[in-house]
Image (tube, rainbow, N blue to C red):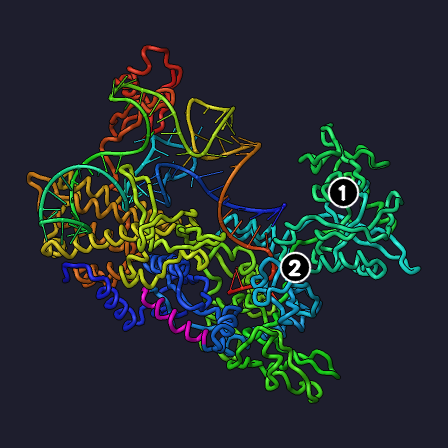
RNA sequence: GCGAAGGUGGCGGAAUUGGUAGACGCACUGGAUUUAGGUUCCAGCGCCGCAAGGCUUGGGGGUUCGAGUCCCCCCCUUCGCACCA
C-alpha cells in the first residue's frame, strides 16, 4: 500500500473496477429475485452548456450519496443520466461561432460525460439519452397527437416579444430593458397563433394531489398551490350598447362585496373595447400602442408606473344602474381572466393609487371594525374584510353575506354568477425557434391543419442548419418546409414552430426506465421503476418544470400508458445554489471590473477579522460586493475541472457535502476545500501509513478473538461509545438528508481513532485490535457514499473486502446500544433557568434522588442562598432547574 | 408589485424539534518540527471583565421554571413570476 494518499491513482483504480464489474447496471428483476425494494434515484438532467458547473457537481453528488447509501441499505437502485439537449443556448452559440447547434450540443455532451465519469458517480450509463435525438423526440410528437385528438392540445393566439428590426420572436431572456439584445430595438408585443396544452383541465387534481406528496418540501407545495391559484369569486357583467348591440363587459372579482364601491372599470390595452375606442381617439390609440411596447415579462409589467386613459365609453353598474367610465390601464393583463377589472379605489390598493392619480371618485363601502377612513392616503386595513356600508340594501352584511346576496341578484338579472377561477393558465408550447422538437402538423390550403400520421413519425429536425438571428431557419429550408398533405396529397407546408423544451423534460424519467424501446413511448419496465423515489434538483424548478411533469404524468396515466401512477416524484429534494464572493473595482466612467476570487488575496488581523483584499497580480485593493450565485457576469465562478485535477473527486465531493446542508445555499471556500483534503489525507495516513499499524490490528483481529473485548477496559468503552454515538448521528443524518453533519461524524470518528491508545495496565492488545477494526469498518462504510474511491481502496487493502465483499454492497453498520450506555449521567444544574453547574448521578437514579442530590449541590446552594425553593423541574437524563 | 424561503462567533455551519447555544471545519494566536516557505503535530479561541460574574442566536415585545426553537410587530437578504434551463 502507498503510504501517501494519491487521489488520482486511487480514483482511477476504483472507477476501472466499477466499470469492469458493471457495478451500476440496474435490472428490473434482481438476480435470484431476492425481493429487494426498488429505489429510483434521479437528479435533474443537465443542459449540455459546455462544461459542468459547481451546481451540477453539487446536484449529482447529492444524488450519488443517496444512490450509494440506499444500495447499502438493501435497495435495488437505479441512477440514470441524460441530456436536456434542446434549447436556446445552442442557437446562440451557433450564431456566435457559425457551428450548427447539433454539433455544438453533441461535442458538449461528450466532454461533460467525461467530467461526470471522473467524479465517480454510480450511474447506469446504458440508459443514457439525449432529448435532441429523433428516437426520443418522436414520442413528444406522438403524445402531442394523442393530446390533440382528445382536445388536450388546441390552437389560439398568444402574445410574444417581437423584434421589429430582426423580424423575429425573442425570448424574455433576449429582451434587455425592453429592447432586443442584438438590435437594441424597442420590443413590441405581437399576437400569433400557438398550440396550447390544456393543463387547466387538470388544475383541480394538480392542486388536490399536493396533499399526497408527503415527501415534498412544504415550501414547494405552497408555491405550486399559489401558482395554481384556485379562487372563489363572482363574474360580473357591466352592460353597455355598441352600435345598437347589447353587450356586457365581463370582469372577475374575489371581492364582490365591494361592488357598490366600483367607480370605474379598466381594461387591458389588447381588450376589444380598447381597440374600438382607439379607432376614434388618436391620443388613446397612441396610448394603446405605448402599452404594447416593451416585453411581455410579468415581473416587469407589475413594476411599471400605473398609467391609464379614459376611453370615453361608459358601462352600466349592474346593481345601481349608474354610468361608469371605462379606462385603459397598463396594469390590467389580458392573459388574466377577462382582461378587464372593476375599479374599487376604496378597497384595493392599486385602484386607490390609480384613482388618486387621475382624480377618480373613491367610495368607501366596507367598514372594518369602525376604523377611520380617509381618502387622503391608503391604509392597510382598507382592504380587510368588514361590514357593508353605503351599499343600499346590502348595508350591514358581512363578506360572505354580501357576496351571496350580490351574486344572487346578478344571477336574476343574467349579469353574473359565482365562479371558481384559476390563476393557472394553459401551457403555450409553440416556440418560433429551430433547435427543438418539430410540431407534427402540416398546413394544407385545402384541408387546413392536418396532423402528421403516426406511421410518418418522427418529423425529423434537420441537424445541419445555422440560425442567424433573423427568424426561424426551418422556415427558410424548403426541404423541411415543403411536403405533401397527408390528407389529400397536394403540396403543403410543415409547421415550423418547435416545442417548448419543458416538453422534453416532462417525461424523460419514464424513458430512462425503458432503454432501447423503439416500438412504443414506454413499456412495462416503467411500471417497475415508477414513481421516482427521490428526485433532486434546483429550487429554481420548484414551479414550472415540476408542475408540467406532474401534468404530463397524469395525461399519460389517463391515456392508459402508466396505470396507477398518479404522481411522478415521491420524494423531492431542492438543493440550494452555489455562491461565491464577488470582488470588483470601479474603473472610471461608471464602469466596473469584476475579479475572480481565486485571483484575490484576503488578509486577516490577529483576531481573524478581514482587514483587506488585494488583487494578487498588482497588490492593489479590490472591493467586496458580498456573495452571489456563481456567474460569468460577476466573474466569480470556479471550474470543477480545476478542483478535480488538483484535489481529486473525493475531496470535491466531500467539500460539497460538508460546506452546508443540501437544501441551503453553499458558499465556496478555497480553505474549506483544503480542510476537506486534509481530512482525507489524515484518514489515509492513519489507515495506510504508520508502518502498516492499522493493517496489523485488522489482521490480528481476524485471528484472535477476545471474548469480552468491548468491556475490556474503560478506554475501550469510552472509545466505542464515541464511535457508536457518531454512527448513530450519521445514520440519522443520512435518513434526513443532512450530509454536512455526516461528514462531521466521520471527522469525529477519525479524531477518536487518532486519540485512542487502548489504555494502560493489563489491557489486552487483542481487544484493542478488535476495537480499532470495528471502528475503521464503521468509518469506511459511513464515509463511503460521500467519498467512495478512498474508502473503496482502504476497505480492500486492509482486508475488509476479502471478509465482507465489495464495499458498495456492504451492509450498513448497526449501532450497538450497549456501547452507548454509561454508568453515570451528567446533569445540568440550573437556578431560575440559568446554568450554574453540573453534577453526576447514577444511571438508575430516580427523580427524588436526583432532586435531593441537586438541592445539596454546592453550585445550587451558592445561588439559592437560603431562599425558599418554589419548584424543582427535573428533566430525566438532561437537567435540574431549581426555581426560587 | 405578487408568491416563497432565510437571518446563530471573524467565516461555513451544529443544536435528534421547548431543556448545557456555538458540535465539526475554516480563519486567527502561541508553541514544536523544518535551512526557509509550505506540510505536519500540540495548545488556545463567542463578546465584555483582573476576577467574581455579566451579556449573546437580525431588532422590539410576549408566553414559559426554561425560547435560536412557540406567538405578535418591524428590518434586511435570496429565489420564482409562465419564451433561460
> Residue A310's x, y, as percent?
81, 51
- Residue A451 appears in which quarter of the rendering? bottom right
Measuring 32% from the left and 10% from the top, which residue is drawn there? A866
Q: How many marks?
A: 2
Most distant residue in the right direction: A244
For the C terminus of chain A, give its image quadrant: top left
Instruction: Give the secondary structure at mark 1.
Output: helix
For the N terminus of chain A, give its image quadrant: bottom left
Dot 2, how many residues are within 10 Å of its Cα: few (below 14), some (14-19), or many (20+)? many
Measuring 56% from the left and 59% from the top, which residue is drawn there? A544
Q: Is residue A68 magenta?
A: no
Vertical side of A637 occupied by A143: above or below: below
Q: Nearer the viewer, residue A871 or A747?
A: A747
Measuring 51% from the left and 79% from the top, which residue is drawn there? A134
Span of residues in magenta:
A104-120
Q: Is residue B6 left or right of residue A120?
A: right
Kindly identify which chain the residue marked by label 2 belongs to.
A
- Residue A346 appears in which quarter of the rendering? top right
> Residue B53's x, y, as percent?
31, 20
> Residue A283's x, y, as percent?
80, 56
Q: Can residue A688 be seen by looking at this rendering? A: yes
Measuring 32% from the left and 12% from the top, which residue is drawn there? A865
Kindly identify which chain the residue marked by label 1 belongs to.
A
Most distant residue in the front direction: A589
> Residue A87's x, y, as percent?
52, 69
Question: Which residue is denoted by mark 1 in the rendering?
Answer: A355
Marker disc for residue A5? none
Vertical side of B52 occupied by A125: above or below: below
Marks 1 and 2 in Cβ contact (< 8 Å) = no
Question: Which residue is denoted by mark 2 in the rendering?
Answer: A294
Q: Can residue A658 be seen by looking at this rendering? A: no
Amino acid at each position: 500500500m502507498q503510504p501517501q494518499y494519491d487521489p488520482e491513482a486511487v480514483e482511477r483504480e476504483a472507477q476501472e473496477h466499477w466499470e469492469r464489474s458493471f457495478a451500476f447496471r440496474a435490472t428490473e428483476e434482481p438476480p435470484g429475485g431476492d425481493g429487494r425494494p426498488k429505489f429510483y434515484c434521479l437528479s435533474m438532467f443537465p443542459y449540455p452548456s459546455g462544461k459542468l458547473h459547481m451546481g451540477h457537481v453539487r446536484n449529482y453528488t447529492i444524488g450519488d450519496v443517496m444512490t450509494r447509501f440506499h444500495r447499502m441499505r438493501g435497495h435495488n437502485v437505479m441512477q440514470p443520466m441524460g441530456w436536456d439537449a434542446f434549447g436556446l443556448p445552442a442557437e446562440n452559440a451557433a450564431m456566435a461561432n457559425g457551428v450548427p447547434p447539433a454539433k455544438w450540443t453533441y461535442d458538449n455532451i461528450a466532454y461533460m460525460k467525461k467530467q461526470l465519469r471522473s467524479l465517480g458517480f454510480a450511474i447506469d450509463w446504458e440508459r443514457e439519452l439525449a432529448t435532441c435525438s429523433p428516437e426520443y423526440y418522436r414520442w413528444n410528437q406522438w403524445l402531442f397527437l394523442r393530446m390533440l385528438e382528445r382536445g388536450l392540445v388546441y390552437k389560439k393566439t398568444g402574445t410574444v416579444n417581437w423584434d421589429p428590426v430582426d423580424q423575429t420572436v425573442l425570448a424574455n431572456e433576449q429582451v434587455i430593458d425592453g429592447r432586443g439584445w442584438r438590435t437594441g430595438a424597442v420590443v413590441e408585443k405581437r399576437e400569433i397563433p400557438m398550440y396550447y396544452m390544456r393543463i387547466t383541465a387538470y388544475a383541480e387534481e394538480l392542486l388536490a394531489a399536493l396533499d399526497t406528496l408527503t415527501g415534498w418540501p412544504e415550501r414547494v407545495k405552497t408555491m405550486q398551490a399559489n401558482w395554481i391559484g384556485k379562487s372563489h369569486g363572482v363574474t360580473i357583467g357591466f352592460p353597455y350598447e355598441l352600435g345598437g348591440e347589447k353587450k356586457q363587459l365581463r370582469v372577475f372579482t374575489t371581492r364582490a362585496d365591494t361592488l357598490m364601491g366600483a367607480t370605474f372599470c379598466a381594461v387591458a390595452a389588447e381588450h376589444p373595447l380598447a381597440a374600438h375606442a382607439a379607432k376614434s381617439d388618436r391620443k388613446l390609440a397612441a396610448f394603446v400602442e405605448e402599452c404594447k411596447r416593451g416585453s411581455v415579462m410579468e415581473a416587469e409589467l407589475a413594476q411599471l408606473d400605473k398609467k391609464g386613459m379614459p376611453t370615453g365609453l361608459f358601462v352600466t353598474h349592474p346593481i345601481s344602474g349608474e354610468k361608469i367610465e371605462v379606462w385603459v390601464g397598463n396594469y390590467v393583463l389580458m392573459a388574466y381572466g377577462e382582461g378587464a377589472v372593476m375599479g374599487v379605489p376604496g378597497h384595493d390598493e392599486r385602484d386607490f393609487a390609480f384613482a388618486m392619480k387621475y382624480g377618480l371618485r373613491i367610495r368607501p363601502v366596507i367598514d372594518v371594525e369602525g376604523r377611520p377612513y380617509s381618502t387622503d392616503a391608503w391604509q392597510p386595513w382598507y382592504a380587510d374584510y368588514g361590514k357593508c356600508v353605503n351599499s343600499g340594501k346590502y348595508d350591514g352584511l358581512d363578506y360572505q353575506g354580501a357576496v351571496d346576496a350580490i351574486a344572487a341578484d346578478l344571477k336574476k338579472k343574467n349579469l353574473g354568477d359565482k365562479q371558481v377561477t384559476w390563476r393557472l393558465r394553459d401551457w403555450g408550447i409553440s416556440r418560433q425557434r429551430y433547435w427543438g422538437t418539430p410540431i407534427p402538423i402540416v398546413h394544407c390550403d385545402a384541408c387546413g391543419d392536418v396532423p402528421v400520421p403516426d406511421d410518418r413519425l418522427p418529423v425529423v429536425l434537420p441537424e445541419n442548419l445555422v440560425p442567424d438571428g433573423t427568424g426561424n431557419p426551418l422556415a427558410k429550408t424548403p426541404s423541411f418546409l415543403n411536403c405533401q398533405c397527408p390528407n389529400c396529397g397536394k403540396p403543403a407546408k410543415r409547421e415550423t414552430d418547435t416545442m417548448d423544451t419543458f416538453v422534453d423534460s416532462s417525461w424523460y424519467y419514464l424513458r430512462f426506465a425503458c432503454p432501447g424501446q423503439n416500438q412504443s413511448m414506454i413499456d412495462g419496465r416503467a411500471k417497475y421503476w415508477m414513481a421516482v423515489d427521490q428526485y433532486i434538483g434546483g429550487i429554481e424548478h420548484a414551479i414550472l418544470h415540476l408542475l408540467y411533469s406532474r401534468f404530463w404524468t397524469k395525461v399519460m396515466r389517463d391515456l392508459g400508458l402508466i396505470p396507477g401512477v398518479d404522481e411522478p416524484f415521491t420524494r423531492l429534494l431542492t438543493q440550494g445554489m452555489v455562491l461565491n464572493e464577488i470582488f470588483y473595482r470601479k474603473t472610471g466612467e461608471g464602469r466596473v471590473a469584476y475579479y475572480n476570487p481565486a485571483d484575490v488575496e484576503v488578509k486577516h488581523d490577529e483576531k481573524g477579522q478581514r482587514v483587506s483584499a488585494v488583487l494578487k497580480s498588482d497588490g492593489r485593493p479590490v472591493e467586496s460586493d458580498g456573495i452571489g450565485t456563481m456567474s460569468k457576469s460577476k466573474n466569480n465562478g470556479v471550474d470543477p475541472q480545476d478542483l478535480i485535477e488538483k484535489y481529486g473527486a473525493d475531496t470535491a465531493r466531500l467539500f460539497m457535502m460538508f460546506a452546508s446542508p443540501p437544501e441551503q445555499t453553499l458558499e465556496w471556500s478555497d480553505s474549506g476545500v483544503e480542510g476537506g483534503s486534509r481530512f482525507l489525507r489524515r484518514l489515509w495516513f492513519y489507515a495506510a501509513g504508520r508502518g502498516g499499524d492499522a493493517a496489523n490490528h485488522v489482521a490480528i483481529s481476524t485471528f484472535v478473538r477476545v471474548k469480552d473485548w468491548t468491556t475490556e477496559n474503560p478506554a475501550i468503552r469510552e472509545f466505542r461509545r464515541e464511535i457508536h454515538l457518531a454512527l448513530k448521528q450519521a445514520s440519522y443524518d443520512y435518513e434526513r438528508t443532512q450530509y454536512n453533519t455526516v461528514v462531521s461524524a466521520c471527522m469525529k470518528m477519525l479524531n477518536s481513532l487518532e486519540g485512542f491508545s487502548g489504555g494502560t495496565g493489563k489491557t489486552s492488545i487483542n481487544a484493542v485490535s478488535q476495537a480499532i477494526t470495528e471502528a475503521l469498518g464503521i468509518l469506511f462504510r459511513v464515509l463511503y457514499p460521500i467519498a467512495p474511491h478512498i474508502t473503496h481502496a482502504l476497505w480492500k487493502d486492509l482486508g475488509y473486502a476479502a471478509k465482507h465483499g465489495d464495499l458498495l454492497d456492504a451492509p450498513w453498520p448497526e449501532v450497538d446500544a450497549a456501547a452507548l450506555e454509561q454508568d453515570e449521567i451528567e446533569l445540568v444544574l440550573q437556578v431560575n433557568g440559568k446554568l450554574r453547574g453540573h453534577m453526576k448521578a447514577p444511571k438508575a437514579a430516580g427523580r427524588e434522588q436526583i432532586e435531593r442530590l441537586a438541592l445539596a449541590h454546592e453550585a445550587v446552594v451558592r445561588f439559592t442562598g437560603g431562599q425558599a425553593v418554589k419548584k424543582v423541574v427535573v428533566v430525566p437524563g438532561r437537567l435540574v432547574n431549581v426555581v426560587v
